[in-house]
Image: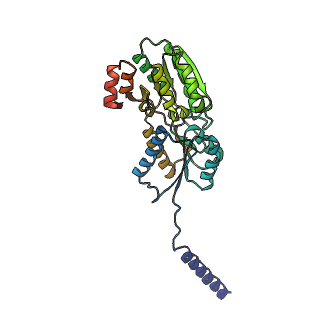
Amino acid sequence: MKRMYTLIAILLVFLGFAYFKENGGLVKQRTPRIGVLTLMHHPALDQIYKGYVDELAQEGYHNGKNIKIEYQNANGDQSNLKTMASKLVDDNSTVIFGITTPAAQAVANSTSRTPIVLGAVTDPRGAGLVKNNHHPGGNITGVSDQAPIKEQLGLIKQFMPHLKTLGVIYTSSDASAVAGYHQIVRECKQQGISLKAYSIANSNDLNQVSEQMLSQVDAVIVPTDNTIAGAMQTLVKNANAAKKPVFPAAGTMVKQGGVATYSVNQYDLGIRGAKMTVAVLKGKKPGNMPIEFVHHGEPVLNLKQAHKLGLKVPHHFEQEAQHEGVIYK
């Protein structure tokens, strides 16, 4: 009997050695896969992705070396998001970074297990992505791009002290844009600003609706809105023809022809998202990580556009943009 036990032990050792050799001698740790899903290309969203990749590298995570980034872009077609989100989940992504609310919602609908980091989701709780912004729970955390609307409206009044009617235009199918619109409505009531609202279903509506709006208002504010950001030149063309200023939420939209804003820095959103991703890779649970908000916007001024429209630029704001933000000349 002893001899039989000895033979069995030898056989097990031999089989273990064979398996060890067959598998390269060591169990290799799987390279983390980072899935990224975005709704479309436009300057603001591209800056978020750039900040994300740059910060991952800064933290020691280099694409193609010790991590693998799989980037999916729906090119503005929301019907693509579900398929792309499912692919990132099926490809066993370690973490998925969802840029924009529709992209994040598509990922959240595809998995309740894979950690998700939100990038540029204005109202995560309102979008149904988390139960509570301070205690998200589940598999989701991230960064909000909620604009500092109170600061922006104060800025508009400084540029236009005799403003009678402010127009707001937003995309009715974009949850972030709708959340931003409601925030603008609340703040306008508090600040005593007369507001007229206009909505579009998609970018094809922008030309006609903006022309109508610009004939009825003195200036325009745009919330965080990916559809309008992707077609900003149409809005600027019509605004210039009507000689009316546009005050958008994003600094990149100021560069495209808006006048000024206090903007959430899109590149910084990517950096924050990357830091949260690294924390998840190191074992932190997303549900225990509060959603991050930016409480003070970066001053951004398009001096050339202001002069084109004959606007007097508040001196203190120009100085602030010069020293703490961005001036486009």
Tell whether 236 sits left or right of 131: left
Residue 240 seen in the figure: yes
Image vertical order of residue 17 relative to residue 294, above or below: below
Residue 181 is at least partly visible in this image: no
Residue 44 at x, y percent in the picture: 47, 37
- Name the residue located 54 percent from the left edge and 36 percent from the top edge: 121
Residue at 41%, 13% in the rendered image: 161
Q: Residue at x 53, y 31 (%)?
A: 228
Q: Quadrant of the C terminus?
A: top left
Residue 18, how many percent across, how many down? 58, 79
In the rendered view of the protein, which quadrant contains the N terminus? bottom right
The answer to which of 108 and 44 lies nearer the viewer is: 44
* Front-lying residue, 79 or 319: 79
In the picture, measured across the screen, residue 22 lies left or right of residue 242, that is right
- Residue closest to the eye, 304 or 102: 304
Can you name the residue that lies furthest to the front here?
241
Q: How is the image coloured?
A: rainbow
What percent of the width, then of the height, locates residue 198?
58, 22
Place of residue 170 in the rendered image (x, y in percent of width and height, measured from the top left): 56, 27
